[in-house]
Amino acid sequence: MQYWWVSQKQTFNQEYDGSYMWSPKKDRAGRSNHSYVNMTLVLPGDRVFSYKDSKLVAIGVVRSRAYSAPKPREFGVTGEQWSDDGWRVDVDYSLLQNKIYPSEHMDKIISFLPEKHSPLQTNGHGNQAYLFAISAELAEALLNIIGGDFPQVGSSDVEVLLDRSLAANIARDTELSETEAEQITKSRRGQGVFRARLESIEAGCRVTGVINPKHLIASHIKPWSKSNNQERLDGNNGLLLSPHIDHLFDKGHITFSDTGDLLISVSADKEALKKWQVSGMNVGGFNQAQLRYLKYHREHVFNQ
Protein backbone atom coordinates (compact mmCIF):
# COMPACT_ATOMS: atom_id res chain seq x y z
CA MET A 1 0.00 0.00 0.00
CA GLN A 2 1.23 3.48 -0.90
CA TYR A 3 0.21 6.85 0.52
CA TRP A 4 -0.35 10.02 -1.47
CA TRP A 5 -0.94 13.71 -0.88
CA VAL A 6 -3.11 15.42 -3.49
CA SER A 7 -3.32 19.21 -3.68
CA GLN A 8 -6.80 20.12 -4.93
CA LYS A 9 -7.06 23.85 -4.32
CA GLN A 10 -8.97 24.51 -7.53
CA THR A 11 -10.75 21.23 -8.15
CA PHE A 12 -11.53 19.57 -4.81
CA ASN A 13 -15.29 20.10 -4.94
CA GLN A 14 -15.58 18.61 -8.44
CA GLU A 15 -13.26 15.69 -7.67
CA TYR A 16 -14.92 14.95 -4.35
CA ASP A 17 -18.41 14.98 -5.88
CA GLY A 18 -17.26 12.79 -8.75
CA SER A 19 -15.08 10.46 -6.63
CA TYR A 20 -11.89 10.81 -8.66
CA MET A 21 -8.51 12.49 -9.12
CA TRP A 22 -7.56 13.94 -12.49
CA SER A 23 -4.41 15.48 -13.91
CA PRO A 24 -3.12 16.20 -17.42
CA LYS A 25 -0.54 13.80 -18.79
CA LYS A 26 1.68 16.67 -19.89
CA ASP A 27 1.71 20.44 -19.69
CA ARG A 28 0.90 22.69 -22.65
CA ALA A 29 4.55 22.56 -23.71
CA GLY A 30 4.38 18.77 -23.95
CA ARG A 31 6.47 18.17 -20.83
CA SER A 32 5.71 15.70 -18.06
CA ASN A 33 6.63 16.05 -14.39
CA HIS A 34 6.82 13.90 -11.26
CA SER A 35 3.25 14.76 -10.27
CA TYR A 36 1.75 13.55 -13.54
CA VAL A 37 3.92 10.42 -13.50
CA ASN A 38 2.73 9.66 -9.95
CA MET A 39 -0.81 9.26 -11.29
CA THR A 40 0.35 6.19 -13.21
CA LEU A 41 1.85 4.67 -10.05
CA VAL A 42 -1.29 4.79 -7.93
CA LEU A 43 -2.84 1.38 -7.18
CA PRO A 44 -6.25 0.28 -5.87
CA GLY A 45 -6.23 0.27 -2.09
CA ASP A 46 -3.76 3.14 -1.78
CA ARG A 47 -4.66 6.01 0.58
CA VAL A 48 -4.87 9.67 -0.38
CA PHE A 49 -4.80 12.78 1.81
CA SER A 50 -6.68 15.69 0.21
CA TYR A 51 -5.19 19.15 0.75
CA LYS A 52 -7.06 22.34 -0.05
CA ASP A 53 -6.61 25.94 1.06
CA SER A 54 -3.75 25.11 3.46
CA LYS A 55 -5.62 22.32 5.24
CA LEU A 56 -6.31 18.60 5.01
CA VAL A 57 -10.00 18.17 4.22
CA ALA A 58 -10.54 14.48 3.33
CA ILE A 59 -9.03 11.00 3.19
CA GLY A 60 -9.57 8.83 0.12
CA VAL A 61 -9.31 5.16 -0.77
CA VAL A 62 -8.13 4.50 -4.32
CA ARG A 63 -10.46 2.26 -6.35
CA SER A 64 -8.71 2.02 -9.74
CA ARG A 65 -5.47 2.37 -11.60
CA ALA A 66 -5.02 5.47 -13.72
CA TYR A 67 -6.83 5.41 -17.04
CA SER A 68 -6.92 7.89 -19.91
CA ALA A 69 -9.72 10.43 -19.62
CA PRO A 70 -10.41 13.92 -20.97
CA LYS A 71 -10.39 16.92 -18.68
CA PRO A 72 -13.67 16.82 -16.73
CA ARG A 73 -16.29 19.14 -18.13
CA GLU A 74 -17.29 20.17 -14.62
CA PHE A 75 -13.92 21.94 -14.24
CA GLY A 76 -15.35 24.69 -16.44
CA VAL A 77 -12.94 27.60 -16.78
CA THR A 78 -10.77 26.13 -14.04
CA GLY A 79 -7.58 24.80 -15.51
CA GLU A 80 -8.07 26.28 -18.96
CA GLN A 81 -4.29 26.17 -19.31
CA TRP A 82 -4.20 22.41 -18.73
CA SER A 83 -4.03 19.90 -21.56
CA ASP A 84 -7.30 18.07 -22.25
CA ASP A 85 -5.63 14.64 -22.37
CA GLY A 86 -5.23 13.34 -18.83
CA TRP A 87 -5.09 10.58 -16.25
CA ARG A 88 -8.09 9.77 -14.07
CA VAL A 89 -8.09 7.66 -10.89
CA ASP A 90 -11.27 6.61 -9.06
CA VAL A 91 -11.24 7.49 -5.35
CA ASP A 92 -13.75 7.10 -2.52
CA TYR A 93 -13.37 10.16 -0.30
CA SER A 94 -14.40 10.65 3.32
CA LEU A 95 -14.60 14.24 4.54
CA LEU A 96 -12.80 15.14 7.75
CA GLN A 97 -15.18 16.84 10.15
CA ASN A 98 -12.29 18.69 11.77
CA LYS A 99 -10.04 20.14 9.11
CA ILE A 100 -6.32 20.06 9.92
CA TYR A 101 -3.80 22.80 9.16
CA PRO A 102 -0.46 20.96 8.74
CA SER A 103 1.42 24.24 9.30
CA GLU A 104 0.23 24.11 12.92
CA HIS A 105 1.76 20.67 13.43
CA MET A 106 5.12 20.94 11.70
CA ASP A 107 6.93 19.78 14.83
CA LYS A 108 5.21 16.39 14.44
CA ILE A 109 5.64 15.93 10.68
CA ILE A 110 8.68 17.86 9.45
CA SER A 111 11.07 14.96 10.05
CA PHE A 112 8.95 12.73 7.79
CA LEU A 113 8.80 15.08 4.80
CA PRO A 114 10.65 13.75 1.73
CA GLU A 115 13.80 15.59 0.74
CA LYS A 116 12.66 15.74 -2.88
CA HIS A 117 9.14 16.45 -4.13
CA SER A 118 7.74 17.24 -0.71
CA PRO A 119 4.09 18.35 -0.47
CA LEU A 120 5.07 20.95 2.13
CA GLN A 121 7.82 23.48 2.60
CA THR A 122 9.62 23.57 5.95
CA ASN A 123 7.49 26.60 6.93
CA GLY A 124 4.31 24.57 6.45
CA HIS A 125 3.23 26.15 3.16
CA GLY A 126 2.22 23.84 0.34
CA ASN A 127 4.43 23.22 -2.66
CA GLN A 128 2.98 23.70 -6.12
CA ALA A 129 2.20 20.36 -7.75
CA TYR A 130 -0.76 17.99 -7.83
CA LEU A 131 0.15 14.52 -6.50
CA PHE A 132 2.97 13.68 -4.07
CA ALA A 133 4.12 10.30 -2.79
CA ILE A 134 4.48 10.26 1.00
CA SER A 135 5.85 7.67 3.40
CA ALA A 136 3.88 5.42 5.74
CA GLU A 137 5.57 7.24 8.62
CA LEU A 138 4.20 10.60 7.44
CA ALA A 139 0.78 9.01 6.92
CA GLU A 140 0.84 7.73 10.51
CA ALA A 141 1.81 11.15 11.82
CA LEU A 142 -1.03 12.81 9.89
CA LEU A 143 -3.56 10.24 11.06
CA ASN A 144 -2.48 10.70 14.66
CA ILE A 145 -3.09 14.44 14.28
CA ILE A 146 -6.43 13.91 12.56
CA GLY A 147 -7.73 11.23 14.88
CA GLY A 148 -6.42 12.30 18.25
CA ASP A 149 -3.92 10.82 20.68
CA PHE A 150 -3.65 7.28 19.42
CA PRO A 151 -0.75 5.03 20.48
CA GLN A 152 2.15 4.78 18.06
CA VAL A 153 1.79 1.88 15.63
CA GLY A 154 3.82 0.22 12.94
CA SER A 155 3.29 1.05 9.29
CA SER A 156 1.51 -2.27 8.72
CA ASP A 157 -1.26 -1.05 11.05
CA VAL A 158 -2.02 2.19 9.22
CA GLU A 159 -5.30 0.74 7.90
CA VAL A 160 -6.45 0.24 11.50
CA LEU A 161 -5.39 3.76 12.37
CA LEU A 162 -7.26 5.08 9.33
CA ASP A 163 -10.45 3.44 10.54
CA ARG A 164 -9.90 4.80 14.05
CA SER A 165 -9.27 8.30 12.77
CA LEU A 166 -12.47 8.23 10.70
CA ALA A 167 -14.39 6.86 13.69
CA ALA A 168 -12.98 9.61 15.91
CA ASN A 169 -14.06 12.28 13.44
CA ILE A 170 -17.55 10.77 13.19
CA ALA A 171 -17.85 10.58 16.99
CA ARG A 172 -16.65 14.17 17.48
CA ASP A 173 -19.17 15.51 14.99
CA THR A 174 -22.18 13.60 16.27
CA GLU A 175 -23.73 12.35 19.48
CA LEU A 176 -22.80 8.78 18.64
CA SER A 177 -20.88 6.59 21.06
CA GLU A 178 -17.42 5.32 20.13
CA THR A 179 -18.93 1.87 19.48
CA GLU A 180 -21.53 3.28 17.09
CA ALA A 181 -18.89 5.35 15.31
CA GLU A 182 -16.74 2.24 14.96
CA GLN A 183 -19.63 0.35 13.33
CA ILE A 184 -20.13 3.18 10.83
CA THR A 185 -16.43 3.06 9.99
CA LYS A 186 -16.53 -0.73 9.54
CA SER A 187 -19.47 -0.30 7.16
CA ARG A 188 -17.12 1.54 4.79
CA ARG A 189 -15.47 -1.83 4.13
CA GLY A 190 -18.70 -3.82 4.14
CA GLN A 191 -18.22 -5.20 7.64
CA GLY A 192 -19.88 -5.18 11.04
CA VAL A 193 -23.52 -4.34 11.64
CA PHE A 194 -24.05 -3.16 8.07
CA ARG A 195 -23.11 -6.54 6.60
CA ALA A 196 -25.14 -8.45 9.18
CA ARG A 197 -28.22 -6.37 8.39
CA LEU A 198 -27.66 -6.74 4.66
CA GLU A 199 -27.33 -10.53 4.91
CA SER A 200 -30.71 -10.65 6.65
CA ILE A 201 -32.22 -9.04 3.51
CA GLU A 202 -30.18 -10.39 0.60
CA ALA A 203 -29.38 -14.10 0.18
CA GLY A 204 -26.61 -13.79 -2.40
CA CYS A 205 -25.50 -12.10 -5.59
CA ARG A 206 -28.57 -11.50 -7.72
CA VAL A 207 -26.54 -11.49 -10.94
CA THR A 208 -24.22 -14.51 -10.55
CA GLY A 209 -26.28 -16.60 -8.14
CA VAL A 210 -23.33 -17.06 -5.75
CA ILE A 211 -24.54 -17.47 -2.16
CA ASN A 212 -21.32 -18.27 -0.25
CA PRO A 213 -20.69 -15.10 1.81
CA LYS A 214 -16.93 -15.69 1.65
CA HIS A 215 -17.07 -14.81 -2.04
CA LEU A 216 -19.40 -11.81 -1.81
CA ILE A 217 -18.86 -8.11 -1.18
CA ALA A 218 -21.31 -6.11 0.91
CA SER A 219 -21.70 -3.14 -1.43
CA HIS A 220 -23.47 0.11 -0.60
CA ILE A 221 -26.06 1.16 -3.18
CA LYS A 222 -25.79 4.84 -2.27
CA PRO A 223 -22.02 5.24 -1.82
CA TRP A 224 -20.73 5.31 1.77
CA SER A 225 -19.04 8.67 1.16
CA LYS A 226 -22.35 10.22 0.06
CA SER A 227 -24.50 8.62 2.80
CA ASN A 228 -25.36 9.94 6.24
CA ASN A 229 -24.61 7.80 9.29
CA GLN A 230 -28.04 6.14 9.34
CA GLU A 231 -27.79 5.25 5.65
CA ARG A 232 -24.28 3.84 6.13
CA LEU A 233 -25.63 1.20 8.52
CA ASP A 234 -28.95 0.54 6.76
CA GLY A 235 -28.97 -2.98 5.35
CA ASN A 236 -31.44 -1.83 2.71
CA ASN A 237 -28.69 0.41 1.33
CA GLY A 238 -26.74 -2.57 0.10
CA LEU A 239 -26.44 -5.57 -2.16
CA LEU A 240 -24.36 -8.72 -1.86
CA LEU A 241 -22.34 -8.86 -5.06
CA SER A 242 -19.64 -11.02 -6.59
CA PRO A 243 -16.39 -9.00 -6.84
CA HIS A 244 -16.59 -8.31 -10.58
CA ILE A 245 -20.27 -7.33 -10.31
CA ASP A 246 -19.43 -5.07 -7.36
CA HIS A 247 -16.80 -3.37 -9.55
CA LEU A 248 -19.31 -2.76 -12.34
CA PHE A 249 -21.98 -1.50 -9.92
CA ASP A 250 -19.58 0.69 -7.93
CA LYS A 251 -18.23 2.38 -11.06
CA GLY A 252 -21.69 3.00 -12.51
CA HIS A 253 -21.33 0.55 -15.41
CA ILE A 254 -24.48 -1.29 -14.34
CA THR A 255 -27.53 -0.58 -12.21
CA PHE A 256 -31.05 -1.94 -11.71
CA SER A 257 -34.52 -0.68 -12.58
CA ASP A 258 -37.34 -0.64 -10.03
CA THR A 259 -38.64 -3.86 -11.56
CA GLY A 260 -35.27 -5.61 -11.32
CA ASP A 261 -34.03 -5.25 -14.89
CA LEU A 262 -30.24 -5.12 -15.18
CA LEU A 263 -29.29 -1.87 -16.94
CA ILE A 264 -25.93 -1.61 -18.72
CA SER A 265 -24.16 1.69 -19.29
CA VAL A 266 -22.78 2.75 -22.64
CA SER A 267 -19.47 3.20 -20.79
CA ALA A 268 -19.20 -0.51 -19.91
CA ASP A 269 -16.51 -2.61 -21.58
CA LYS A 270 -18.60 -4.86 -23.81
CA GLU A 271 -15.81 -7.41 -24.22
CA ALA A 272 -15.44 -7.75 -20.45
CA LEU A 273 -19.20 -8.08 -20.03
CA LYS A 274 -19.24 -10.84 -22.62
CA LYS A 275 -16.46 -12.78 -20.90
CA TRP A 276 -18.18 -12.34 -17.53
CA GLN A 277 -21.49 -13.40 -19.10
CA VAL A 278 -23.19 -10.21 -17.94
CA SER A 279 -26.14 -9.32 -20.15
CA GLY A 280 -29.74 -8.19 -19.93
CA MET A 281 -31.62 -10.08 -17.22
CA ASN A 282 -34.11 -9.57 -14.44
CA VAL A 283 -32.82 -10.09 -10.90
CA GLY A 284 -36.16 -9.92 -9.10
CA GLY A 285 -37.96 -7.29 -7.09
CA PHE A 286 -36.67 -4.96 -4.38
CA ASN A 287 -38.32 -3.66 -1.23
CA GLN A 288 -39.41 -0.02 -0.95
CA ALA A 289 -36.36 1.08 1.03
CA GLN A 290 -34.02 -0.50 -1.53
CA LEU A 291 -35.88 1.27 -4.34
CA ARG A 292 -35.14 4.65 -2.76
CA TYR A 293 -31.41 3.91 -2.75
CA LEU A 294 -31.49 2.46 -6.26
CA LYS A 295 -33.10 5.66 -7.50
CA TYR A 296 -30.09 7.56 -6.15
CA HIS A 297 -27.71 5.09 -7.80
CA ARG A 298 -29.39 5.46 -11.20
CA GLU A 299 -29.41 9.27 -10.98
CA HIS A 300 -25.99 9.92 -9.45
CA VAL A 301 -23.73 6.86 -9.98
CA PHE A 302 -24.90 5.14 -13.15
CA ASN A 303 -23.15 6.33 -16.33
CA GLN A 304 -26.15 6.74 -18.62
Image (cartoon, rainbow, N blue to C red):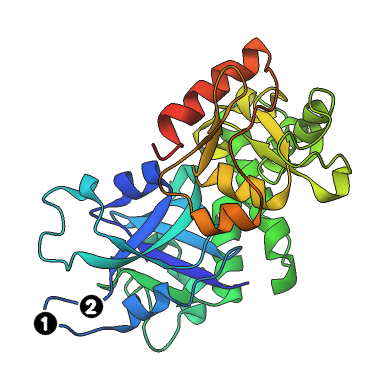
Mark 1 neighbour class, 10 Å CA radius: few under 14, some 14 to 19, many 20 or more? few
Instruction: Give the residue at x 55% y 24%.
Output: 294
In-image side of 243 versus 250 (left or right): right
Locate the N terminus and report the quarter of the image it occupies: bottom right
Classify mark 2: helix, strand or loop.
loop
Task: Check residue 26 in the rendering and tell me which mark sits there, or answer none.
Answer: 2
* The C terminus lies in quadrant: top left
Location of residue 126 with respect to 227 vertically, above or below: below
Residue 116 position (above or below residue 222): below
Camera-side residue of 142 and 77: 77
Q: Residue 144 appears in which quarter of the rendering?
A: bottom right
| Camera sees residue 101 | no
Q: Residue at x 48, y 25 (%)?
A: 296
Q: Nearer the viewer, residue 11 or 166?
A: 11
Q: Is residue 62 left or right of residue 287?
A: left
Please identify the residue farthest to the top as the structure is shown: 288
Q: Nearer the viewer, residue 239 or 191?
A: 239
Callout 2 amino acid? Lys
Q: Residue at x 31, y 44 (%)?
A: 13
Please say if the residues under marks 2 and 1 sit with CB atoms less than 8 Å apart.
Answer: yes
Q: Residues within 10 Å of mark 2 (few under 14, many from 20)?
A: some
**Foreground of the two, 177 or 263:** 263
Q: CA distance from mark 2 to mark 1?
A: 8 Å
Q: Is residue 212 left or right of residue 74?
A: right
Residue 275: percent from left, percent from top: 63, 58
Q: Where is residue 226 shown, x and y percent of the image? A: 49, 34
**Which picture quadrant has residue 123?**
bottom left
The residue beneath circle 1 is 29
Q: Amino acid at mark 1?
A: Ala
Q: Is 44 positioned to the left or the right of 87 in the image?
A: right
Say which element carries label 1: loop
